[in-house]
Amino acid sequence: MKNAVLFGDSLTYGYGVYKKDSLSYLIEKRFPKLSIINSGVNGDTTREAVLRLERDVLNFSPYLTTILFGSNDCAPGEWSHRTVEEFQSNLEIIIVRIREKSPLCHIILITPPPVDETVFMPWTTNKRLAPYCDAVRDLSQNKNCILADFNKYILEVSQGNLESFLQEDGCHLSEKCYIYLSEFIGNIIEDIINKE
């Protein structure tokens, strides 16, 4: 069975939703012939991701890996903030090391979703998030990775009304949004499988 590693922060982990509503569960349900490994860790930035890359990704010799970071990296808090330059550099390290260990691995880079600024809780803003999304888009081109522009997709689908797509904190994904994310990523995975 081929391994598909979902690498990221709380959005990949499935913070605030039941396991049956998480990205890993929904992808596993759609692709029973893939072994889905949830390597999402709450609160992680790309800096922590580099440190756990060997254990949580490379050890599985992945057939494909999704990479979703940025929401914590761009947050203003001292404990988590990473500059756009560090964010991009860390992602490059992750991509290069995956390619070194698993040259045939399909790497899917996901732009972090927008936040709902109409509620008081988001720890970041869409203006702060935008350059991090741009960095993911640039890397997908420069490093020949598959781009899953989830940020753009959710803005289009929601028409800017994000309330039902996000939890009360305005940052974490709702059950509804996980359905959209799993279908969006699932279609990309299906394309990869069909081309082989």
Image (cartoon, grey):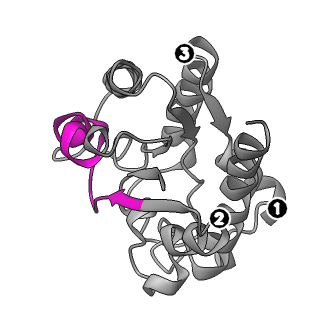
Q: CA distance from mark 2 to mark 1?
A: 14 Å
Mark earlier in primary sequence (1, 3): 3
Mark 2 lies on residue: 182
Mark earlier in primary sequence (2, 3): 3
Q: Secondary structure at mark 2?
A: helix
Residue at point 28% right, 59% down? Answer: 41
Q: Which mark is residue 143?
A: 3
Q: Could you say which is closer to the camera, residue 157 or residue 159?
A: 157
Residue at point 71% right, 67% down? Answer: 180
In the depicted structure, whether residue 173 falls above or below residue 89: below
Magenta stretch encompasses residue 45? yes
Relative side of 182 to 106, left or right: right
Q: Could you say which is closer to the camera, residue 144 or residue 125?
A: 144
Amino acid tagged 1 = Val
Q: Quadrant of residue 116?
A: bottom right
Which portion, as a residue range, is magenta?
Answer: 37-56
Within-10-Å neighbours for mark 1: few <14, some 14–19, many 20+: few
Q: Check whether the beta carbons of the residues at disc 2 and disc 1 lie within 8 A of each other.
A: no
Within-10-Å neighbours for mark 3: few <14, some 14–19, many 20+: few
Q: Could you say which is closer to the camera, residue 48 or residue 185?
A: 185
Q: Secondary structure at mark 1?
A: helix
Residue at point 54% right, 82% down? Answer: 21
